[in-house]
Amino acid sequence: MMSYHDEQESLESVKAWWAKWGNTTTWIVLIALIIAAGFNGWNYWQRRQAAQASVLYDYVQQAVSSNDQALIARASSDMEDKFGGTAYAQMTALTAAKAFYMAGNTAGAKTQLQWAIDYAKDDEYKQIAKLRLALVYLDEKNYDAGPKLLADQPLDVFKGEIADRRGDLLAAQGKRDDARAAYKVALDTLSANDMSARKLIQFKLDALGG
């Protein structure tokens, strides 16, 4: 059993340690608590943002189903302004772009696709947006903007599709040799299981001759 003298020595040791390290320890604990509180607050805010964005995304889909162009534009703008950092914003941009494009509103489609290219959280969505915007440029015969859009090194999973779209742009410009080279890259890159896409590219390649 510890004697009174031993207890006093232990108490004095604790006092000495606290005198030396007490303030530092207090600050460390305080900072850790602040960080933990901030982390919890950030997680709560993100969950709340995602929940609200989910509700708005349902609203966007309803607007698309009813083909209400004005409502699609307003809901998409709200999503990008209020919840641009969520995954729902990039989904909204592609959904709205498709609705605008099908309705003949190419300006609206380009705006949404460019937003996805600039601000989408995931690189896959950026790549899809580039492919679709390049198709719009092809429709518009904007042969300068399309190739520039696809000039960056694509993600591996999109290499075949990007090469195919480059081939379309080059073929439309009459650059047959370059188009053939692009289509061959697409065939070499696309999965052997993607038979429908491969058949279409082979058809385009055959149509170029040579």
Image (tube, rainbow, N blue to C red):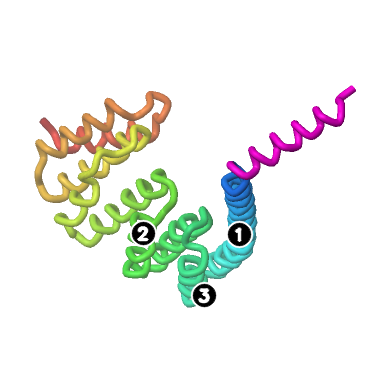
Q: Residue at x 75, y 32 (%)?
A: 10
| Quarter of the figure that contains the N terminus | top right
Q: Is residue 110 left or right of residue 120?
A: left
- Relative image position of residue 76 (x, y in whole percent): 48, 68
Q: Residue at x 49, y 75 (%)?
A: 74
| Quarter of the figure that contains the C terminus | top left
Relative to 88, residue 183 above or below: above
Q: Quadrant of residue 185?
A: top left
User: Which residue, given by chain and number where applicable, does mark 2 sit on?
Assistant: 113
**How would you rate the neighbour count of disc 3 (Cα within 10 Å): few for under 14, some for 14-19, many for 20 or more?**
some
Q: Nearer the viewer, residue 160 or 171?
A: 160
Whether the magenta-drawn stretch holds residue 12 is answered as: yes
What's under tag 1, amino acid-wise?
Answer: Trp
Which element is circle 3 on?
helix
What's under tag 3, amino acid-wise?
Answer: Leu
- Gap between marks 1 and 3 measured at Cα: 27 Å
User: Which residue, given by chain and number where applicable, does mark 1 sit on?
Assistant: 45
Nearer-N-terminus badge (2/1): 1
**Magenta part of the chain:** 1-20
Which element is circle 2 on?
helix
- Gap between marks 2 and 3 measured at Cα: 18 Å
Q: Nearer the viewer, residue 174 or 22?
A: 22
- Residue lying at the far bottom of the rendered structure: 70
- Relative image position of residue 61 (x, y in whole percent): 57, 63
User: Which residue, given by chain and number where applicable, does mark 3 sit on?
Assistant: 71
